[in-house]
Amino acid sequence: MEVRVPASTSNLGPGFDCFGLALKLYLTVRADAKPDACDPCNVTTTGARENEALPRNSANLIYRAMTFAARREGVSLPPVELNVHNEIPLASGLGSSAAAIVAGIKLCSLLTDHAISDQTIQNYATEFEGHPDNVTASLYGGFTISCVTHDRTAVSAKFDWPSHIRAVVVSPHSQIPTHVARAALARTIGRGCAVHNLQRTALFTAAIAQQRYDLLWDAMKDELHQPQRQSLVPGLAEALTLPRMEGLLGVALSGAGPSIFALATDRTDEIGARIASCFSAHKIESTLRTLEVDNEGCRALQ
C-alpha cells in the first residue's frame, strides 16, 4: 500500500492554529506487510538530507501514527516494512510531522483493510499532532480552515486555491522544533492583539472567497505569534517589513518557522531572493522553493 501526502504551511499570518495550505512537496510512503519479520517495523528513507536522522524502527513517527490508529480502531497491524521518500525538510515549518501522521493513519486503514473515514483520520491526526491546521491541509488539500470543538472533534472547511497564486518558501539551513517555537509565545494576549488577528483572519477568508487578492497584504499581518518568534528566526523581522512589489501579495512565517513564505502571482525568483537576503544578512544560508498549492490532499497510490 502506498500513499502520497503533501507538505503544508500554516497560520498564513493571522490564522494561528486555524489556517492551513497544502503544498506540492511530498511525503510518499509504501508499506509492505512482512508477517514473518522479527521486528514490528523496519524503515528505509530517501529524500531530504535530514531524513538520515529519522528512526528506522518502531520509533518512527509514521509507524507510531499507524499503531495509534490501530489501537483506536481495535485492529492488529502486521509487521511492516516502510519505504519512505520525503521531500519535506524537517522542523522547518512545512508540516513534516503532520504529513507523517496523516500517512501513518491512512496506511493503517489500507494495510488492515479497515475503513477509517477522512473525518476520523482528521480527528486522530489532530489529537496526535496537538493542533488541526497542518494535518487538515495535508489530508484534504487546498486552503483549509479548522477548529476543535468542545468534544474534541476537528471541524474544517476547504477552499480550492487559485492556481495563479504560488507559495515562495525560503527555508534557512537551521531547524526549530515546534515545541521550542510554541514556548516562545505569550501565555496571555491583550484585547487589541486579539481583535487585530480576528479582523485579519476574517479578511483573509473573505479575500479568498471573493477573489479579492489585493486584500491579502493587510490580511496577512499578525500580532499573535510572529513578533514573539522573531528572536528565534534571525531575518524574520526584516522579511515581514519588506515593501510591496509587483507580484507580491503578502509575507508570513511558515507555521512555527523558521521558513518564511510569500504568496505571489509573479516575479517569484526576485521575491524569493529578497527574502533570502534577509537570512544572508545574518550569515544564514537558505533554500528557495517556489511551490504550487496541492488541491487534492492525501492520496492512495495503490
Image (cartoon, helix red, strand yellow):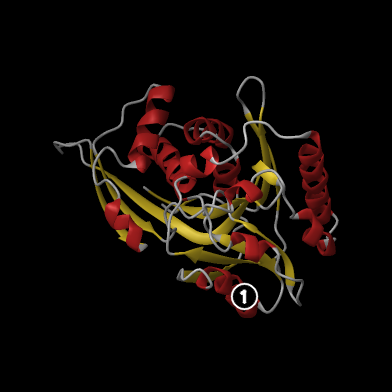
Residue in front for this viewpoint, 256 or 66: 256
Up the image or down, 7 lies above or below 167; here it is above
| Residue 112 in view (yes/no) | no
Residue at point 40%, 41% (across, down): 104
| Residue 85 in view (yes/no) | yes
Residue in front for this viewpoint, 206 or 177: 177
Residue 29 x %, y %: 37, 51
Classify residue 50 by image quadrant: bottom left
Report the side of 189 relative to 279 (left or right): right
Residue 182 x %, y %: 54, 40
Residue 238 x %, y %: 64, 65
Up the image or down, 275 lies above or below 119; here it is below
Residue at point 23%, 36% (across, down): 79
Up the image or down, 267 lies above or below 140; here it is below
Residue at point 45%, 71% (across, down): 285
Q: Crowdedness of circle 1 by 10 Å Cα count: few (<14), some, many (20+)?
A: some
Up the image or down, 125 lies above or below 243; here it is above
Q: Which residue is mark 1?
A: 274
* SS assignment at label 1: helix
Residue in front for this viewpoint, 164 or 218: 218
| Amino acid tagged 1 | Arg
Residue in front for this viewpoint, 17 or 230: 230
Residue 292 x %, y %: 60, 66
Report the side of 155 relative to 290 (left or right): right
Residue at point 41%, 52% (across, down): 302
